[in-house]
Image (tube, grey):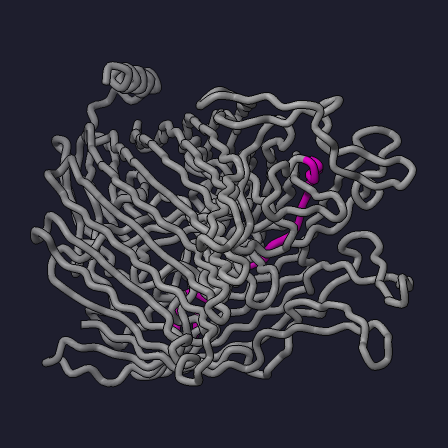
């Protein structure tokens, strides 16, 4: 507490010495939805004539400091009524505002995304999507999907049809930090990538940071997807949900103490496997998840939040093979307002990703996963209307379980085995400033200082010349090195240490009222590595910490862009160009075995990665027809040169296309409000096919024709594209009834494009010739779902 007071004193002295000695007062408070008391993130608060402007933070709080006097305040938020009122500042004023959603006022008003480009803020490479927009987008099997929706943003692609995860600006899916109420989600997919783990009914806000990433975020090299759950309705009890072909969902929310506390609980489950049982099919695949949140406001300065998520997928083949995996999170948060200018948030967070296999046919069970425990304390200090400071600290403790083997019965003949667990600690501090330099120039700058320690109790393999991979100069291949000894490190003893300075900077320069150019630079360091040799993450992939052999990834990204709104903000254009370079990107030697590998360093080489591109986005924000067109021209490459002059490296040490390279990426999404009853939507996406390696020859061995392969990723899968449409019918609502419902009809892949998920090669048993086999997952998929609320 003494340190905090010293910081506040120094900041106050700085403010005074910077010319702020005139008598001033602070206007502060929260902004929320009037109907349910849900706080609103990113609400614009402007003071007319004073050139003062701010937005609400992640918890709906705002603060403005102004000279004594009378002002007119203007509060604006997408799809909500604008509030304009006069206010007299003769002392510090705490004032909360409640906004009314436009749809509650005028039934015939067209609600649009209107995600207006803010030309004043230095924030760039950031996309925000409202839940209402996401729910209008057609998706496979009629299931609303947050992860699939962000694939329509510039610079974001997927690894192919039905694949999990997403790729940002040429980076791997493992380089994305996915947060749900500040807790890390390690696997964002259900049913091996067909659906995401996020129940849209429970989500309040989401932002995707592709560049210019604020200093409070760290730990991943490419992007941050920051998602917040709803707090729950503290005015009255409500329920809503949906019934679909594959799954259904139900969410309940209401007050614990009216206007002071609320709860939210939502569940979702699939049931397609039940139809298999009717046909005596013993195979099954299903998922379920649960979202919960409790909050209580003790007084105007203290609020407590408890939120959690639990999800599981179960895949079974004839009851002899069962795969179970999923995430669990829990976050206890305390919001405290020290003064009208100093807001704080203390969080204690638990995240767990579990992967299990029950293999009855061989007589053992397999468990693996990763847990982390995160303690973080964040502050936002509104020094003045020109300077805002964000600062804080956090420490994450990791517990890695690479694998546990348990005999499933006493007759299995399998012995218990625990692959050695790994532990790590990642503390960090950060400072970030938002400053209005002139009326036309705004900057955001700061740094993050991160540290990482690989901890015992573990045994470290020792190798000759400290090289876990050897090179055979005669065969020109890399091979596993044989350990020359081992060294044991006791509990919490440091095995390897890293520390990195991560600067962040972005600037916005207004060329006119609705035009600006922006530029940004950020360094991100990723200490966790995903052990996977596939383009798309799979549930079996294992996370491992950086150590003496596997170095942390260090990413430097530069971006510059032009942003404009025109025709009274009805349209907006965003154009960005970026260049990103990553050191220490893991690459694998040919023939690497990654499953249950107790010495993963023996098949790994540290390489580098780079990506660069041009992104374009045109939005239509208002009117009956709204939506956007996004196009990205990009390149993603990696290189692993030889460690010495005699080594060839991977692909002869030359740059080669990464598995995430998509030269062209076009995405179009639109929504048309025909009348009060009908709303139509359409999506179109087109991407360059995923890089792959095809055979370039063949040879015969003992009468078997075997294909031979050339350099990595020299070929592509065929062009990927599909068109999806939807129609939403909202029957006329009887005002005497609280029940409201809507029917959603959709067709995924309207023209039944057979997109290749993969192409494999085999020998035809009849002709003896090699042949290519294309695997396609989806044809045309019609769906219908019913959504309701009361």
Above or below, comparing residue 207 to residue 142 in the picture: above
- What residue is shown at x 55% (from left), y 45% (from top)? 175
Instruction: Find out whether residue 611 is within the magenta segment.
Output: yes
Provide the residue span drawn in magenta: 602-626
Query: Where does the image place residue 356, in percent across and percent down from the top left?
Result: 46, 53
Q: Residue at x 74, y 51 (%)?
A: 657
Residue 705 in picture, x, y percent from top left: 87, 67
Tell me the residue at 79%/36% (across/down): 641
**Is residue 612 visible in the rendered structure shown here?**
yes
Q: Is residue 780 above or below residue 48?
A: below
Residue at image coords 31%, 79%: 786
In depth, the one of 762 and 204 nearer the eye is 762
User: Image quadrant of residue 713?
Assistant: bottom right
Q: Quadrant of the C terminus?
A: bottom left
The x, y position of residue 221, in whole percent, is 56, 40
Taking 296 as reference, is 192 above or below it? below
Q: Quadrant of residue 36?
A: bottom left
Location of residue 647 by image quarter: top right
- The mark total stands at 0
Q: Is residue 790 left or right of residue 494?
A: left
**Residue 624 seen in this snapshot:** no
**Direction front: furthest residue:** 411
Q: Name the foreground residue: 741 vs 386.
A: 741
Residue 299 locus on image (x, y percent): 10, 38
Describe residue 465's horizontal placement relative to residue 144 as left or right: right
- Classified by dominant secondary structure, the portion drawn in magenta counts as strand
Q: Is residue 643 magenta?
A: no
Residue situated in front as seen by the camera: 601 or 586? 601
Left or right for 427, reference 705: left
Quadrant of the image containing the N terminus: top left
Q: Nearer the viewer, residue 257 or 485?
A: 485
């Amino acid at each position: 507490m003494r340190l905090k007071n010293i910081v506040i004193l120094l900041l106050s002295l700085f403010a005074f010495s910077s010319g702020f000695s005139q008598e001033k007062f602070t206007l502060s408070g929260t902004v929320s939805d009037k109907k349910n008391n849900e706080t609103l993130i990113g609400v614009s608060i402007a003071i007319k004539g004073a050139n003062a402007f701010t937005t609400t933070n992640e918890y709906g709080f705002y603060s403005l400091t102004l000279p004594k006097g009378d002002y007119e305040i203007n509060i604006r938020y997408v799809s909500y009524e604008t509030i304009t009122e006069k206010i007299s500042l003769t002392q510090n004023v705490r004032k909360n505002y409640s906004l009314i959603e436009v749809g509650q006022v005028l039934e015939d008003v067209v609600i649009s995304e209107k995600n207006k480009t803010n030309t004043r803020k230095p924030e760039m490479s950031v996309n925000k999507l409202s839940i209402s927009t996401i729910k209008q987008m057609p998706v496979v099997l009629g299931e609303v999907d947050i992860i699939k929706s962000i694939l329509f943003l510039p610079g974001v692609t997927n690894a192919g049809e039905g694949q999990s995860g997403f790729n940002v600006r040429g980076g791997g899916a493992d380089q994305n930090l996915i947060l749900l109420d500040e807790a890390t989600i390690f696997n964002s997919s259900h049913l091996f990538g067909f659906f995401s783990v996020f129940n849209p009914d429970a989500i309040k806000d989401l932002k995707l940071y592709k560049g210019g990433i604020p200093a409070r975020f760290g730990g991943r090299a490419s992007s941050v997807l920051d998602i917040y759950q709803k707090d729950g309705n503290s005015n009255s009890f409500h329920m809503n949900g949906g019934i679909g072909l594959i799954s259904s969902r139900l969410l309940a929310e209401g007050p614990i103490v009216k206007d002071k506390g609320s709860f939210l609980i939502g569940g979702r489950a699939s049931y397609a496997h039940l139809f298999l049982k009717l046909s005596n099919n013993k195979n099954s695949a299903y998922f379920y998840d649960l979202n919960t949140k409790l909050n209580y406001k003790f007084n105007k300065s203290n609020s407590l939040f408890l939120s959690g998520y639990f999800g599981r997928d179960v895949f079974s083949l004839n009851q002899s093979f069962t795969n179970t995996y999923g995430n669990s999170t829990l976050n206890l948060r305390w919001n405290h307002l020290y003064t009208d200018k100093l807001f704080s948030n203390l969080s204690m967070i638990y995240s767990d990703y579990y992967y299990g296999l029950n293999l009855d046919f061989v007589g053992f069970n397999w468990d693996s996963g990763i847990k982390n425990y995160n303690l973080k304390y964040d502050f936002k200090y509104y020094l003045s209307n020109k300077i805002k400071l964000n600062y804080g600290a956090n420490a994450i403790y990791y517990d890695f379980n690479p694998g546990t083997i348990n005999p499933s019965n006493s007759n299995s003949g399998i012995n218990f085995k625990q692959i050695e667990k790994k532990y790590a600690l990642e503390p960090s501090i950060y400072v970030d400033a938002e400053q209005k330099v002139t009326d036309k120039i705004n900057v955001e700058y700061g740094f993050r200082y991160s540290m990482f320690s690989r901890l015992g109790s573990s045994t470290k393999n020792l190798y000759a010349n400290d090289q876990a991979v050897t090179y055979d100069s005669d065969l020109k291949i890399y091979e596993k090195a044989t350990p020359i000894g081992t060294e044991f490190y006791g509990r919490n003893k440091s095995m390897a240490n890293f520390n990195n300075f991560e600067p962040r900077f972005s600037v916005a320069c207004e060329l006119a009222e609705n035009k600006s150019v922006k530029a940004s630079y950020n360094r991100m360091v990723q200490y966790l590595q995903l052990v996977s040799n596939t383009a798309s993450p799979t549930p079996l992939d294992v996370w491992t910490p950086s150590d003496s052999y596997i170095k942390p990834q260090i990413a430097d990204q530069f971006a510059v862009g032009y942003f404009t709104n025109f025709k009274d903000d009805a349209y907006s254009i965003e154009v960005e160009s970026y260049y990103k370079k990553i050191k220490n990107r893991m690459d694998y030697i040919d023939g690497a075995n990654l499953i249950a590998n107790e010495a993963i360093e023996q098949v790994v080489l540290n390489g580098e990665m780079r990506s660069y591109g041009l992104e374009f986005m045109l939005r239509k924000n208002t009117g009956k027809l709204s939506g956007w067109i996004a196009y990205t021209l990009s390149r993603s490459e990696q290189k692993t040169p030889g460690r010495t002059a005699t080594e060839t490296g991977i692909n002869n040490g030359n740059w080669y296309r990464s598995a995430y390279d998509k030269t062209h990426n076009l995405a179009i999404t639109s929504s048309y409000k025909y009348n009060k009853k009908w709303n139509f939507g359409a999506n179109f996406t087109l991407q360059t096919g995923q890089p792959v390696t095809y055979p370039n020859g063949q040879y015969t061995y003992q009468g078997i024709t075997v294909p031979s392969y050339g350099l990595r990723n020299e070929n592509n899968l065929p062009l990927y594209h599909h068109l999806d449409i939807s129609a939403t019918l909202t029957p006329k609502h009887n005002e005497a009834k609280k029940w409201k419902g809507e029917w959603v009809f959709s067709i995924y892949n309207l023209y039944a494009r057979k997109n290749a998920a993969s192409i494999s090669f085999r020998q035809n048993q009849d002709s003896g010739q090699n042949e290519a086999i294309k695997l396609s997952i989806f044809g045309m998929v019609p769906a219908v779902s019913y959504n309701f609320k009361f």
